Amino acid sequence: MHHQIDSLAYGNKLRSLPPEHKLGFAILLFILGYISSWYIQILISIWLIIWVVIYGGIPLAFYCQLLAIPFGFWLMSLPPLLMGIGAFSSLNNFQQDIIFGFPLGDFFLYLSKQGISQSGMIFTRSWCLTSCMYFILLTIPFGEIITVLQKYKCPTLLTDLLLLMYRFIFILTTTASELITAQKSRFGYINWRRGMYSLSLAIAQLLTKSLENYRQISLGLTSRGFNGELRTWHSRRYRTNWRYLTEAIAGYSFLLVVVVRQNY
């Protein structure tokens, strides 16, 4: 999936736009989505779907697969959010929060009104903020993000760490995929017991191969005269699309006015 994300970032229809504009747009929407109410967060999420899928040309099915990742974590967090438990003797203290429930020994297990409200808030916020991050990942190649950070005097140590981490993500995913494919070809996951044994072997081999890849990268950097700073270079010329820029400014201004009027 990481390779597909990188491929789409280089081949999307918004590639010709200046990366500073796209990065600033996503960051401003991220901040606005973090401080706004649920319906503004939904509007931002839908708006970003238009930007990514329609303007950027990213396949809708792939975008939905990416959104399924945070939604999966949200679903796993639902039981402790929705359910509440308290002493049966102090039932009157949380009676107003109960939708329905049943006694369980000396305790009372119930579905919480506050829990439903919190789970809804987490859903809209995670959808909104994740959409902002996906807009960056799917429309701006990582090398251009590093170039923008270097342009605005981001510490060299931070940009180098980001670049190396991004590289090692690809190494880990590729190595893990190759190991699991090799094990599946030898019926390594034919049953649960065999699968757990194969998984433990894959993890151990993944660590060994990752350290070997790290050593090879270190030797490669040294042989090319690495002096403590990784530099990126792009000859691509960007052009401002005034139609997109106008929509971004007008849409963000509208959302900002709604948030300000709501709070003040």
Image: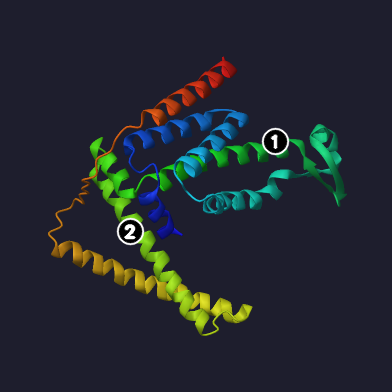
When the figure is inspected, residue 216 is found, relative to residue 115, above or below; the finding is below
Q: Give the class, few, some or many, for how many residues have Cα within 10 Å of label 1's Cα (few <14, many ≥20).
A: few
Q: Quadrant of residue 150?
A: top left
Instruction: Provide the secondary structure element on which disc 2 rests.
Output: helix
Residue 214 pos. (x, y %) = 29, 66
Residue 263 pos. (x, y %) = 57, 18
Instruction: Provide the secondary structure element on which disc 1 rests.
Output: helix
Q: What's the mark number on residue 117?
A: 1
Under mark 2, the amino acid is Arg
Mark 1 or 2 closer to N-term?
Answer: 1
Q: Does the CB distance between marks 1 and 2 fall below 8 Å?
A: no
Residue 182 pos. (x, y %) = 46, 80
Under mark 1, the amino acid is Ser
Residue wearing tag 2: 167
Work out which quarter of the rendered image holds the C terminus and state it. top right
- Of tags 1 and 2, which is closer to the observer? 2
Count the marks.
2
Left or right of 51 in this view: 161: left
